[in-house]
Image (tube, helix red, strand yellow):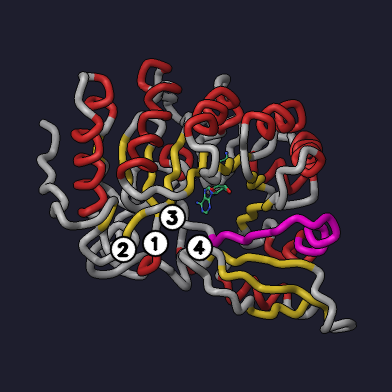
Amino acid sequence: MPTILPPAPADAPGLSDKFGRQATDLRISLIDKCNLRCTYCMPADGLAWLPKSKLLTLEEITRIVRIGVRDLGIRELRLTGGEPLVRVDLTQIIAAVREEFPELPISLTTNGVGLAKKAAALAEAGLSRINVSLDTLHAETFATLTRRDHIDSVFEGIDAARAVGLAPVKINAVLMRGINDEQAPELLAWALERGLELRFIEQMPLDADHTWRKDNMVTAAQLRAYLEPRFILNPDTRPRDGAPAERFLVSTHADPQTILGAVGIIASVSEPFCADCRRTRITAEGKVMSCLFSREETDLSALLRDGSSDTDVAERWRAAMWGKPRAHGMDHVGLGSKDFVQSDRSMSAIGG
Ligand code: SAM
């Protein structure tokens, strides 16, 4: 039996929730499959992938974007996964959205494997920006973290993305204690030299193996302690405007006045920013997740497939978002709580 959701109040704008937030940033997962097996995300053997018939089609994805942008106040779109480059019609999806919404910022989060061959076509289709995930510069550490040996393909992908002008290329890095945490300064130096904007993301309890422990993750404070002997992190004074990353302008102790570039720190666990969250997520099979940590999900695919109107789809989406929890899947407290229960979905099955 599908859950009966109380509707969002008629006078609540767009994708509002009962805590006064409004989602304007849409993240759609295009596919749950991935070609890496990052230890903080997927099990070594992968997961039971969705059959193709369950994945949202190009038409369903563009319809969701249309309803979101036209009717519900969505102002930006991020395509993710799983690994979105694995989706064969990725370029067509971007082109279809771009044709309908020439001004909409469309970004992609990818592990960069095989990106070199596709970067030009993605840019031409209308992709605005790209985030490539890379946690280390060392082949051995990369293989330990991802259980695959594709680091060269990722480097080539990053170079190709820069060459076709998908600027600024952002790099997402997760630090794991005892594996790559001490590599944080060299990763930042490498990114600054290339004009890439590195963003460190705290490891969240979204691994399929459920091995995350709060006392074993690398916090933003610990990361800053790794970086500060080599770099000065000057807080960026521009308003954060709902961005998950706290941004710093980076200089060195030898030359504090010269800003070499920027670094972002996404402290979802130790310094959560739920009060300012503007995100709504749709999984690869068409479920709304109002929060990354939510254990509730609301299916849109049945409505998309049974002839329901755009208004029906919009109202169900609004109802799902009206029920968005205050923090990390819960209304009263967040990840710090002893009654926090990790979702059965891994990051790859939600869409990071
Ligand atoms: N496959 C693509 C990629 O690697 O970027 C897109 C999907 S991946 C789930 C999106 C982002 O989530 C990546 O930057 C990845 O490092 C991050 N991620 C995955 N599991 C995470 C976790 N448990 N905690 C924090 N970030 C995580």
Question: Which residue is under mark 2?
Answer: 21
Question: What amino acid is labelled 1 in the image?
Answer: Cys
Residue 208 visible in the current orientation: no
Q: Is residue 116 above or below residue 183?
A: above
Q: Which mark is residue 205?
A: 3
**Which residue is nearer to you in this view: 97 or 300?**
97
Q: Is residue 277 left or right of residue 237?
A: left
Q: Is residue 108 left or right of residue 155?
A: left
Give the image quarter of residue 1: top left
Question: What amino acid is labelled 4 in the image?
Answer: Pro
Question: Which residue is under mark 4?
Answer: 244
Question: What amino acid is labelled 3 in the image?
Answer: Pro
Q: What stretch of residues is rendered in magenta?
A: 188-202
Nearer the camera: disc 1 or disc 3: 1
Where residue 119 appears, as percent x and y from the top left, is: 72, 32
Work out whether mark 3 precedes mark 2 in sequence or the reverse, and give the earlier one.
Answer: 2
Give the image quarter of residue 188: bottom right
